[in-house]
């Protein structure tokens, strides 16, 4: 099977890799057990047939409760083979938020690789969506044909996955990314990071988190081995590092917060990460003061790469190699140069900014996503026609990120809107405000992000309750039924009323001074 035959079909692309590297390890688990590419492909083919029998195919969505087991990872690949878009659910989400996600993507089923989480079952029942546990159907799946066969007509424009992010209206946004876009990403990632069949890619990122796109596709679509790190290990710094070393990982990708946590806990030392040749980080800024510590540990023998990219543009669109020169002074290192399979503009509204001035980064190219699933209004607001070429069909994504270009390198300046990156998660502060406003004793709420030091800060909620008495513990308890843990504010300030400016709007400047 030649490369042209899998240009627009991720299922065929994986089958081609499995045929090329049948005996090489595809997945190396926590316990040290390995699954070869031929074994994984056989499981994927059986699962694909089982899914197809239940109506999965192009234009359909399958929601996954995925704990990084071989079956969970294979279910993602099986969806790709039949052309159904998958979306991985975050079981930390409370039932209300899970229900909203399911109401947006309307999957034909929720497929679990273990016992369904109670909130998942409850949310699915609200929309009459069947919840199926793969363990309950293992013998049935095992009886199906493991050969590749013809599992469906999948095109490059079919959605491969839907990744949900925070939404300013209070409803999460589902970013839809196509097969062709992911194949473009794989080709770019392979060329930039040099990932080959001898590599072992650590998968510390949660599987529902955008950064996991790099782990999953850079490993399993190049013949490399994927080494999943479970959610249980993420709470134990030393166990996590031991797993990386035991699996002989060569590539690591995470948010800077996780690397800083590992250094703070003394889990990263000169004798750990011994086989890691590339440490990639992105999703939030990495303060130079902290990055210097990582460079002192590994800079002499390991490539340190700062990456940038919105979920809407297939995970990553720039990569910059850090050197000692980049660590002088304060602030954040450069984002670097936009990938050569993208084009970009830096705009002030619809006009280019003068050289050296800050403006909104706008991206064009084959990795710009399909839009927000089942959300035409928000899609039309963010995915627009290139205003500098109105007579040519050029689709452009407005990132909302403010950047400045200096000597050919992009530097992050801030955001146009009220969106933040906190612990690597993209959060719309309005979604937290919307949740607070649904709590009975809350009259009005405003949420701000207070920076503690470069790249890091606290989410602070200001809540007006009038004469009603309410304490912080009660607010936290009520919010936990509406938002995932990473969106719960770090601090609350409870007031009788919120300060207003001359126009009668909430005075956010004064709030930050309280």
Image (cartoon, rainbow, N blue to C red):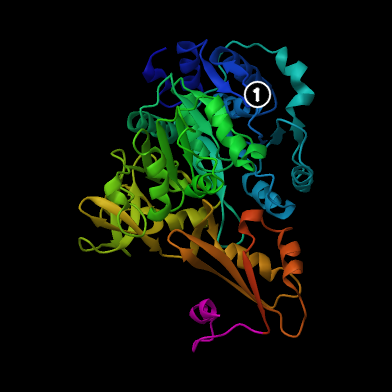
Asked if residue 119 shows in the view, the reply is: yes
Q: Is residue 229 left or right of residue 402?
A: right
Displayed quadrant of residue 497: bottom right
User: Per the image, is 55 magenta?
Assistant: no
User: Which residue is rendered at x = 76% and y = 25% of the image?
Assistant: 135
User: Per the image, is 513 magenta?
Assistant: yes
Q: Is residue 302 left or right of residue 231?
A: left
Q: Which residues are magenta?
A: 497-514
User: Between residues 19 and 128, which one lies in front from this camera angle?
Assistant: 19
Q: Position of residue 209 (x, y in %)?
A: 55, 43
Quarter of the picture containing the N terminus is top left
**Would you place residue 495 above or below residue 133 in this image?**
below
User: Between residues 101 and 295, which one lies in front from this camera angle?
Assistant: 295
Task: Give the residue at mark 1.
Answer: 31
**Would you place residue 67 above or below residue 126 in this image?**
above
Magenta portion: prevailing SS class:
loop
Displayed quadrant of residue 470: bottom right
User: Between residues 456 and 393, which one lies in front from this camera angle?
Assistant: 456
């Amino acid at each position: 099977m030649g490369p042209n035959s899998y240009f627009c079909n991720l299922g065929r692309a994986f089958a081609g890799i499995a045929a090329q590297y049948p005996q090489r390890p595809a997945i190396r688990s926590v316990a040290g057990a390995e699954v070869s590419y031929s074994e994984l492909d056989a499981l994927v083919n059986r699962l694909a047939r089982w899914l197809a029998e239940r109506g999965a195919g192009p234009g359909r969505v399958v929601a996954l409760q995925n704990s990084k087991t071989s079956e969970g990872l294979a279910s993602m690949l099986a969806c790709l083979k039949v052309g159904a878009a998958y979306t991985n659910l975050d079981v930390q989400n409370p039932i209300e938020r899970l229900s909203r996600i399911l109401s947006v993507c309307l999957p034909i089923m929720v497929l679990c690789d273990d016992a369904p989480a109670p909130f998942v079952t409850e949310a699915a029942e609200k929309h009459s969506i069947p919840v199926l546990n793969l363990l309950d159907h293992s013998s049935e799946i095992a009886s199906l044909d493991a050969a590749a066969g013809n599992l469906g007509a999948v095109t490059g424009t079919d959605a491969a996955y839907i990744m949900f992010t925070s939404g300013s209206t209070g409803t999460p946004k589902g970013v839809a990314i196509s097969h062709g876009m992911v194949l473009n990403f794989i080709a770019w990632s392979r060329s930039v990071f040099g990932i080959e069949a001898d590599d072992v890619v650590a998968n510390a990122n949660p599987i529902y988190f955008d950064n996991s796109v790099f782990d999953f596709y850079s490993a399993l679509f190049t013949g490399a081995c994927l080494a999943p790190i479970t959610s249980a290990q993420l709470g134990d710094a030393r166990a996590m590092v031991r797993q990386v070393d035991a699996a002989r990982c060569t590539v690591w990708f995470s948010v800077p917060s996780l690397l800083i946590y590992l250094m703070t806990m003394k889990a990263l030392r000169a004798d750990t990460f011994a086989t890691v040749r590339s440490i990639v980080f992105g999703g939030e800024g990495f303060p130079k003061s902290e990055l210097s510590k990582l460079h002192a540990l590994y800079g002499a023998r390991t490539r340190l790469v700062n990456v940038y990219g919105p979920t809407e543009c297939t995970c990553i669109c720039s990569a910059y190699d850090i050197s000692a020169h980049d660590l002088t002074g304060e602030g954040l290192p450069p984002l670097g140069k936009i990938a050569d399979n993208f084009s970009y503009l830096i705009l002030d509204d619809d006009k280019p900014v003068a050289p050296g001035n800050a403006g909104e980064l706008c991206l064009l190219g084959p990795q710009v996503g399909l839009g927000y699933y089942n959300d035409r209004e928000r899609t039309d607001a963010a995915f627009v026609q290139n205003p500098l070429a109105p007579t040519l069909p050029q689709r452009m994504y407005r990132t909302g990120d403010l950047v400045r270009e200096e000597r050919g390198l992009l530097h992050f300046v801030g955001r146009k809107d009220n969106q933040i990156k906190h612990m690597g998660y993209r959060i719309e502060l309005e979604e937290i405000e919307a949740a607070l406003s649904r709590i009975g004793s809350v009259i009005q709420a405003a949420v701000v992000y207070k920076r503690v030091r470069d790249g890091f800060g606290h989410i602070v909620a200001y809540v007006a309750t009038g004469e009603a008495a309410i304490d912080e513990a009660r607010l936290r308890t009520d919010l936990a039924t509406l938002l995932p843990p990473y969106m719960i504010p770090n601090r609350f300030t409870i007031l009788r009323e919120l300060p207003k400016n001359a126009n009668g709007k909430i005075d956010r400047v004064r709030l930050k001074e309280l």
